[in-house]
Amino acid sequence: MGLQACESGYSETGPTGSVTSSMLDSSAAQVSVKVNAYTSPETAYQYALLKSAETTIQEGFGHFQIVDQNSYSRAVATTTYNPYVGYGGSFRTNTMNKPHVNLVVRMFPGPKAKTRR
């Protein structure tokens, strides 16, 4: 049985990442996405847009505008030891990048998107 790598799913918090929002004032929110290294930066950004839309609707607004954004990747290194390689074993270091996205959105009143049923 082997381990399988999976990208982070879209969820508030979990073992592979988080998608959160917090209100900055009555019509502005900060959205933060932190995902694992198997999730692409593009997917992380899509999660941030989805959370922005959800927060906008939840707060009773019709649409939002991104007023600030910051995207980056945090490098994470892991080192493993294999005692069965050569004399004395072998070390291997893997470096992976974990995408992070932070958006500040301003929400505005207006027509709300129709929900699917």
Image: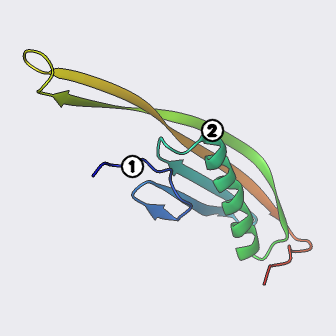
Task: Evaluate whether residue 99 shows in this view.
Answer: yes
Residue type of the residue flagged with mark 1: Gln
Give me the disc on residue 4.
Answer: 1
The residue that appears at 57% across and 51% down in the rendered structure is 33
Query: Quick one: label 1 or label 2, which is nearer the N terminus?
Result: 1
Please tell me whether mark 2 sits on a helix, a strand or a loop: strand
Residue lying farthest bottom?
A: 117
Query: Where's the C terminus, which quadrant?
Result: bottom right
Rendered location of residue 109, percent (x, y)? 88, 71
Closer to us: 39 or 105: 39
Rendered location of residue 19, percent (x, y)? 56, 58
Position of 46 with respect to 116 (left or right) is left
Residue type of the residue flagged with mark 2: Ser
**What residue is shown with label 2?**
71
Image height check: is 36 above or below 28? above
Q: Kindly check if marks 1 and 2 are in contact, taking CB atoms under 8 A apart as contact.
A: no
Of circles 1 and 2, the one toward us is: 1
Rendered location of residue 25, percent (x, y)? 69, 63
